Amino acid sequence: MIQKSPYKFFLLTLLLIILDQSVKLAVHFYMAPGFAGQVKLAGDWLKLHYVLNPGMAFGMQLGHEYGKLLLSIFRLFAMVGIGYYLVMLAHRGAPNGLLWAMAMILAGAVGNVIDSSFYGVFLNNAPYGSPTPWFHGQVIDMVFVDIWEGFIPEWVPVWGGQYYSTPIFNIADSCIFIGVCSILFFQRRFFGEPPVEGSLLPITGPDATEASVLPAADFIDEADESHTDHTKEAETAAEDNQHPTPESVLPDESKRVE
């Protein structure tokens, strides 16, 4: 298995982080939040819509006083773990598709970590009442695929009676989503067992694993013994035909003339 350099995959991660942060900062400085600054990109279904997300991806939140801090710390550890796992996969010669997917997931994790860690300080967008602006920054979301919006019926548990719309997300969320979906869709190709070196066909099935090969000497001995047995049987049969038994030579008593 050939080891691969992880640097080109980290380069993709870096480019996606730059793209994500550039779009977020452009939206922050040049767009008005909410519907007032909404920009239509493709009809009424694809828009730029500036919102601040205090929680996780796609607007989800942890309902605790220190939930945001815990989430930011978790993102930091996840970022380090994903980076280490990417290096390990590259050194093990993992398929390029898996490595590209991991690079995208890493880019998404780092992009949102930057928002959570520093935006509360440098963009002053930490929620009101946060114990500290550090690690309490709100993530900037802007991609709005407006497929559905409205009130959820009252009979729906938890969310019933509230107004919801299609989640608004950012470039980092998209990277994580695409990377995870790629791994799920192509997991057999990414994590399948490698073929046996030097074999033309894969060795599968119980017959292939349970089959045994006899040594050449044993095979020759068995063949010689079988040939000797057949030769002895043939010689015995020939002798029986050439030398009739005495009973067959004696005249038949019923044919004697009295």
Image (cartoon, rainbow, N blue to C red):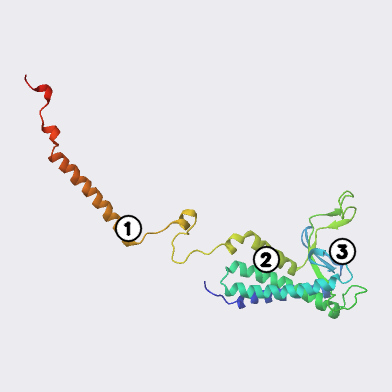
At x 71%, y 64%, the residue is 177
From the viewer's side, name the closer residue of 170 and 222: 222
Residue 209: mark = none
Task: Look at the numbered disc 3 and give the secondary structure of its residue.
Answer: helix
Q: Say which amino acid is labelled 2.
A: Gly
Q: Are marks 1 and 2 in contact (CB under 8 Å)?
A: no
Left or right, residue 241 beside residue 156: left
Residue 41, given in percent of the width and then of the height, sits at 76, 63
Residue 219: mark = 1
Q: Nearer the viewer, mark 3 or mark 1?
A: 1
Residue assigned mark 3: 35
Residue 25 visible to the viewer? no
Q: Say which amino acid is labelled 3.
A: Phe
Q: Quadrant of residue 220?
A: bottom left
State which quarter of the image contains the C terminus: top left
Q: Quadrant of residue 244?
A: top left
At x 11%, y 31%, the residue is 250
Residue 204, given in percent of the width and then of the height, sits at 49, 57
Q: Earlier in the sequence, mark 1 or mark 2?
A: 2
From the viewer's side, name the closer residue of 192 and 130: 192
From the viewer's side, name the closer residue of 139 and 221: 221
Left or right, residue 233 beside residue 134: left
Task: Look at the numbered disc 1 and give the secondary structure of its residue.
Answer: helix
Disc 1 and disc 2: Cα gap in Å? 55 Å
Residue 179: mark = 2
